[in-house]
Image (tube, rainbow, N blue to C red):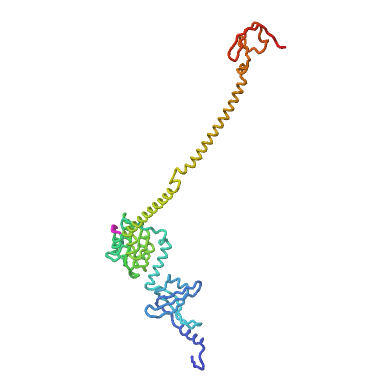
Amino acid sequence: MTSSPEQPQPLRAVVAATKSWVERLSPIWVEGQLIEIKRRSGAVTQFLTMRDTLAEVSVTISTSQAVLDAAGPLTEGTVVAAWVKPTVWSKSGSLTFECRELRPSGEGRLLAAIEQRKRMLQAEGLFDPARKRRLPFLPRRVGLVTGAQSAAERDVVENIARRWPAAVVETRHSLVQGPAAVEQLIDAIRSLDAHPEVDVIIVARGGGSLEDLLPFSDEALARAVFACRTPVVSAIGHETDTPILDLVADVRASTPTDAAKRVVPDAAAEAQLVASALGRVRAAITGRLDAESRRLAELRSRPVLREPSAVLVGHAERLQQAEERLSRAIDARLREEQQGLRHAIERVRALSPQATLQRGYAILTDADDRTIDRVGATGTGAELTARLADGRLGLTVTQTMEDA
């Protein structure tokens, strides 16, 4: 393809020629680190940015959603092996690589396997927060599973002793990396779980590479911890390390030192809390007493309590007035009744036979004490008695005369 300033080639022709030359290259497997994953929802083509693991070289990779799904869970930073074929985009003239297969490699492969295992165990409910148990406030014995004479063991034991000197640690040593570690870890955990006085179990290990921490992402270990009746604290590696054991354990501690802080209280801090609580209780009691004292003083300052009899003065006056009114009413009623009685006596006396006798009349009775009220009731010679006001007279009838 010839060209000159007078006869330049069209850009489309140059891009097409470049595209034709590049696409004659065969597909090739390359290794690199994913530094950007651009997922477009609903789009057929997805874009990745891959960088060389050593040099500052990066390229854009286009792939399908099916290839991404087949590769398993991928995150930025994962090292992968990609089967790519270079190509040129005609519209932009940019060089890109079409990825036809993608596989995690090295740590990426391990991470993908661990991620797949996590999904399976999560689906079975081993990570369910509802089944996680609370740690006891003060365990009778603290079970510890760790490597013999390891820094993790020293950190846990020393921090437990520093926080709660009376705490008892029941230790089971085990390998914490390598092919035999899983079986020994399971045996140690089951031994402590069967101990009648162990109330909490710590599984501790210092930091390490992904390969070193693989035993703590083992499925058998996760199921053994899930089956424990005793609460389990996972203290594996550093804060950034997250093996499967962290997810299935009842409590995750960021470090072995953090695990010691979680399983036993701080004696000094608890004593301070108790002293603070006592201070608050005393202050509350004192405040309540002061408030009640002020209330009592206010009550006592009221006139009715300062001079209790004062409230009776008004009642006494009203009672005295009532007594006086009652006495006057009784006297008036007695006078009325006495006057009425005198009038009744006078009327009775006016109507009595004695009054008639006192006016000079007499009552005549015969020998049978029958009253003689007419002339025809007696006869000449009859013996009569005359009742006078001051006595009786014996009479003999010598003559009877009837009025015409």
Residue at left offset 71%, top offset 11%: 403
Q: Say which of 5 and 197 sits in front.
A: 197
Q: Say which of 340 and 266 sits in front.
A: 340
Residue reaching furthest to the left: 149
Q: Is residue 210 above or below residue 91?
A: above
Q: Is residue 228 above or below residue 113?
A: above
- Is 354 positioned to the left or the right of 50 in the image? right
Q: Position of residue 58 (x, y in %)?
A: 42, 79
Q: Position of residue 311 (x, y in %)?
A: 47, 43
Residue reaching furthest to the bottom: 6
- Image quarter of residue 283: bottom left
Q: Which residues are magenta?
A: 164-168
- Is 75 positioned to the left or the right of 203 in the image? right
Can residue 235 be seen here? The reply is: yes
Say if the magenta span includes residue 316: no
- Is 301 positioned to the left or the right of 278 in the image? right
Q: Position of residue 113 (x, y in %)?
A: 39, 68
Q: Say which of 374 and 43 sits in front.
A: 374
